[in-house]
Image (cartoon, rainbow, N blue to C red):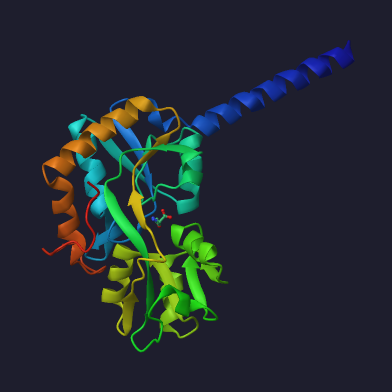
Amino acid sequence: MKKNFKKIFAVALSAAFVAAAFVGCGSDKKADSNKWVVGTNAEFAPFEFVSSSNGVIDQYSGIDMEIIKQIAEDNGKEVEINNMEFDSLTVALKNGQLDAVIAGMTVTDERKEAVDFSDPYYVAKQVMIVPEDSTIAKASDMEGKTIAVVQGYTGEVAVQELGYQYEAFKKGTEAILELTNGKCDVVVIDSATANQYVKDNAGLKIVEDNDAFESEEYAIAVKKGDTETLELINASIKKMKEDGTIDAISAKYADMSAEDDTASDGTASDSSAQ
Ligand code: GLN
């Protein structure tokens, strides 16, 4: 009898744990149907960055942030931005903690296995950032050089595919610091973000090699099978491409410096996907 009680207690206890795990895992942030919980990694200017006024961090800004706000508004939703590690974003989508991810995220076959992507809203490519006096003029000149990339970004994959050794950093700023300190020869990263780093750090330049680096498309990710959210997002993206909203948002941020939260007018160096 005593033994039986123990057993029942153990079963009840483990059931409680399973239930708790479900609650924790769902932590159902998405319970509010009027709100989209959107994941990003706000370390990717000009697409997403934390901006401050009077030294106080007050909001997430950038091209992606404006795009997602507009999409949500078109669909009568509020947006709650969750700033997370880039690598955790697809996992959080899978776990049902997020409704969508917008993070300058390139559509790749590997990611397509984990999430569903919207229609693309931006075209980018990998470029090389080097010191102004560097002799690197094309991707093959990186052979034998010290190459820095950001871990988990498509830049890492691109360098892997070229077959070169590299060092992967957790953040773009860390890779750039390595370059400005003379500890590496080149950083491979997305084009618009590279423009940003070159504007904000004296003595650097961008080298392109369109034969070595194919163009990439940024899209919004949703949980696999969430066609309802995907269709709403796609309808808005279509509208924003047609009426010029995406081009206008991109142009607004093309000339900003990371310290500004007010972007000035300018011409986007990359174009939105057609
Ligand atoms: N476009 C790159 C990728 O998808 C980098 C994205 C990012 O850092 N936000 O891997």
> Relative to the observer, which residue lies in front, 35 or 235?
235
Residue at image x 19%, y 63%? 254
Ligand 1 quadrant in view: bottom left
> Relative to the observer, which residue lies in front, 172 or 115?
115
Instruction: Return the residue found at the far bottom.
Output: 133
Instruction: Return the residue found at the far top.
Output: 1
Quarter of the figure with the N terminus: top right
Residue 32 can be seen, yes or no: no
Residue at image x 22%, y 51%? 272
Where residue 220 appears, as percent x and y from the top left, is 34, 42
Q: Is residue 213 above or below residue 141?
A: above
Q: Is residue 236 above or below residue 191?
A: above
**Would residue 116 be found to the left or right of residue 81 on screen?**
right
Residue at image x 47%, y 32%? 96
Residue at image x 11%, y 42%? 243
Q: Is residue 109 above or below residue 139?
A: above
> Relative to the observer, which residue lies in front, 239 or 35?
239
Quadrant in the rendering for residue 174: bottom left
Where residue 48 appears, as percent x and y from the top left, is 31, 55
The number of numbered badges drawn on the structure is 0
Quadrant in the rendering for residue 191: bottom left
> Relative to the observer, which residue lies in front, 15 or 89?
89
Residue 239 can be seen, yes or no: yes
**Would residue 6 be found to the left or right of residue 234 on screen?**
right
**Would residue 19 be found to the left or right of residue 203 on screen?**
right
Quadrant in the rendering for residue 257: bottom left
Where residue 18 appears, as percent x and y from the top left, is 64, 26
